[in-house]
Image (cartoon, rainbow, N blue to C red):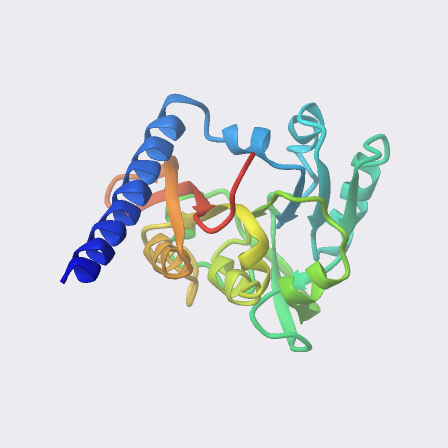
Amino acid sequence: MVLILSFCASDDIRVFNRTFQNFFLLIKSQLISQDYFLREISSLIHVGANDGSERFKYARFGLFVVWVEPIDEVFNQLEANLAEFKLQNARKSLLLDTPGVAVDLHIASNNGASSSIFKFDKHEEIFPSVSMVHTQTCTSETVDDLFDGLNLSSPVAIVIDTQGSELKVLIGARRTLQKIAFVKVEGADFSSYEGGCTNDQIHQYLTGLDFILLRKKRIAHKKGVGSYYDSVYLNRNIKLS
């Protein structure tokens, strides 16, 4: 009986400690900026790079960054923009859940920023000036494939902004996510792209892998349609200094 009570007490303490830690992290994340996690990491993978507009911000934190962008013409812009950033480099790749699949990527008119493997659904209701102008056929890879060829210093974060295919990218990163400290991911709470994932689906997947939501920020909204969010998650199994 004493042994059973001791075990229960020890188990209760572990639950209390984890609950307290989660509460502390939540409060901390609300008091500081959405990108505070950049102070906690050494390396970052940015999937859906476009032209690398965040390169200056990453440089301020001294991060080693691997940018991933599949669109030919945008990738050329990205490489040119990164020329002066010695710790940042670009990889041309379309990352999904399965490797070696030929996929049509629909290229958007806003310099490719809204490009997706999916066609628009309600996206045009929030961004009416954006249209699809042509397609590019890509062969898919996964984050797991990419990560195996990198030599990144820990802690590592991943940023994903792939216009509806974020869940596919995460599924293709299942092994890598065990080594990822933070995930920052964009998601919508409505059907922005036909067949694209929603913010809730992303949340369910990451929390099922023992990630905790630290911060969720609305970045676009239209009444009667829905909202886009940037969300930051922490891997509870990785200890940070």
Whether residue 114 is visible to the viewer of this picture, yes or no, is no
Q: Is residue 236 left or right of residue 46?
A: left
Provide residue 178's location: percent of width, then percent of height: 54, 58
Locate residue 52 relative to residue 203 in the image: left or right.
right
Q: What residue sits 86% from the left and 35% below the top?
A: 83
Residue 30: quadrant of the picture: top left
Q: Is residue 27 above or below residue 90?
A: above
Q: Residue at x 38, y 27 (%)?
A: 28
Residue shown at 66%/33% (left/top)? Answer: 53
Identify the residue at image location x=66%, y=44%: 154
- What percent of the width, then of the height, locates residue 192? 40, 55
The image position of residue 229, as x and y in percent, is: 39, 42
Residue 181 image offset from top left, x and y in percent: 54, 46
Tell me the quarter of the image containing the N terminus: bottom left
| Residue placed most toward the observer, 37 or 2 | 2
Instruction: Determine if residue 37 is in view.
Output: yes
Give the image quarter of residue 206.
bottom left
Q: Quadrant of the C terminus?
A: top right
**Residue in front for this viewpoint, 207 or 224:** 207
Q: How many marks?
A: 0
Q: Is residue 65 left or right of residue 30?
A: right
Q: Relative to residue 108, is residue 167 drawn left or right? A: left
Name the residue furthest bottom.
Answer: 101
* Residue at the left extreme, as displayed: 1
